[in-house]
Image (cartoon, coloured by chain):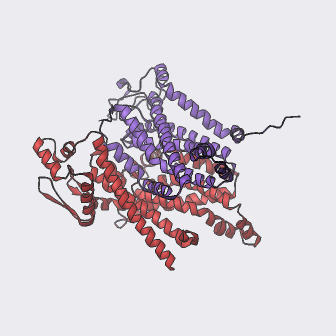
Amino acid sequence: MPDTVITYIIRRLVAAIGLLVIVSAVTFSIFYLVPRWAGATPETLATRYVGRAATEDTVKLTAERLGLYDPIAVQYWNWAKGVVVGAEYDYGAGVERCPAPCLGYSFITKQPVWPELLDRIPVTLSLAAGASVLWLALGVAIGVLSALRRGSIFDRAAMTVALAGVSLPIFFTGLISLAFFSYQLGWTVPGGTFVKITDNPIKWAQALTLPWITLAFLFSAQYARLTRAGMLETMNEDFIRTARAKGLPERTVVVQHGLRGALTPIVTIFGLDVGLLLGGAVLTEKTFSLPGLGKYAVDGIVANDLPKILGVTLVAAVFIVLANLIVDLLYAVVDPRVRAK
Amino acid sequence: MRKIEGRSLGQIAWMRLKRDKVAIVGFVVIVLLILMAILAPLIVKAIGHPPNEFNQDLIDTQGGTLAPLGRFGGMSWDHPFGVEPVNGRDLMSRVIYGSRISLLIAFFATLLSVTIGTVMGIVSGFFGGWVDALISRLMDVFLAFPLLVFAIALAGVIPDDAFGLQGDSLRIVLLIFIIGFFNWPYIGRIVRGQTISLREREFVDAARSLGARRPYILFTELLPNLVAPILVYSTLLIPTNILFEAALSFLGVGVRAPTATWGGMLSDAVTFYTMPHFMLWPGLAIFITVLAFNLFGDGLRDALDPRSR
């Protein structure tokens, strides 16, 4: 690999780490500041952690031990230090260890957040992996066919369905498919039946089929629209005429010249979408009761458990930044003009 | 002989739009929906069932399922959409009232994003240099946020009584801010790109060489040329925001019960997924509204920028 590529990669990596530090600092300060603007005090925040029957002194002591009186910078520093070297929390009922990487410690369930997140990542990963393969294949294929047969019945039907697809909320299509396929036809068992792929691949796929299809329907609609628009544009370019004039078979012209040109924006959006989805397919997981990252965040909200939400937000940001990084690096490898910038 | 007239770009776009039947259908549906939202109290008065009126007499309390009596979820002349399971609230008036929350939040959130995005985009694109670098990095940070997780978290940590507001009005203002505030970088990027390409055009050079000041160039020379993309993007952002609001309500961090919201109704329907009628009406309402905006927005884009066809 030439030196320019390596410098480019290093520069992008440093930028990505910087971005993560900023994102975590902003997230932290918003969760620190907003409740205070809304009238919360260190004492009211501490009452969440000590139970209802606590006396005023206990509450104050707890707030002090948890560092809730500290200025925001000190609290963020302590939290960031926890991510790197781990942390210990002492809130009266004994010292609790939170080993590195300590993304947070739930004072409600008295558990460090990271191991719980680790349990949930495979669920979200399985969901995103299956669905993204499905929607990319489906969306791009439909988009290309639509663009080639522009104005035909297939094109119109596909684009109508695609427009309907992008206008439907996933929790509605999810509910409808649950009502129909699970309840009426009894094809799949509804709700919370995630099985690890290493335990039983068939049951794993079975439990995820419905969420995959629902998610893929929504996304492939968007990808079909994008691919079609991109293909219509590139197929009118001069290099396509050149390729045809060279006598290349139409198949090669479409796939290797046309699609390749139209694929660049698709790759960008695919990276972003997968990154976003890995950070918690909140709605899909809630609709199908899958115990993934998104469901964990929602449960955290319901229980008013801030450290959990902070943990998910950070992991999600890592996925988004990583996805962006991979897309950028792919560009650098594919397109030499990017590196020069 | 017909007189030859000059037509402005706006007139040409309007002529194209008028010919696009699908977009016009979308537009008519949007107008009807807005009227429905504004006139909701009158319509519901005419139906005779307020959205939060319990109708326990319509519920099957014997069977244990608490399903509505009668076929199709208790559909009747009196309750054209049927009633809710358990407490028998009228679904039609709840769907009608739900449109108010959806449209109100989506409109104002869009307005907020478009305002911030346009200002940031123009400033960033026009001034360039360190201003551009700073704003562009800011956009990167915003785009790296897991938006939905973050929005539910933020909507979840605000207490019920804050900023001198409470109840529905607090939640509505809050949702407008959360949804509007996190969506601005998308339009900001578009406006920035357009501004950069416009900045180098001859008419800007001409204005500058005639001694025009920066504010004049920004508002009189650049902004009119940005109206078209901003308009198109706003129309297409509204449906996104409607889906966003519905999602937040579905997750239980939107406007609180018992106020009727489409997302909230769907969330109630999760437990009763064996009774499809219950999820059908709010789902259809979201679908029709979002589809209408998408159809109109697509038509508008085609009319203003014929290359995108």
Q: Residue at x 47, y 34 (%)?
A: B104
Q: How many marks?
A: 0
Q: Residue at x 28, y 61 (%)?
A: A80
Q: Colour of chain B?
A: purple
Q: Residue at x 47, y 31 (%)?
A: B100
Q: Quadrant of residue B261?
A: top left
In the rendered image, residue A255, in percent from the top left (x then y), is placed at 64, 67
In the rendered image, residue B76, in percent from the top left (x then y), is placed at 48, 25
Query: Can you say whether A339 is above or below A152 in the image?
Result: below
* Image quadrant containing the C terminus of chain A: bottom right
Q: Colour of chain A?
A: red
In the rendered image, residue A1, in percent from the top left (x then y), is placed at 50, 80
Q: Quadrant of residue B171?
A: top left
Give B203 or A46, whichever is nearer the viewer. Answer: B203
Confirm whether residue A203 shows in the render.
Answer: no
In the rendered image, residue B230, in percent from the top left (x then y), is placed at 58, 45
Query: Can you say whether B16 is above or below B45 in the image?
Result: below
Query: Can you say whether B80 is above or below A180 in the image?
Result: above
Give A1 or B116, whichever is nearer the viewer. Answer: B116
Q: Residue at x 25, y 63 (%)?
A: A81
On the picture, is B21 further left or further right than B64? right
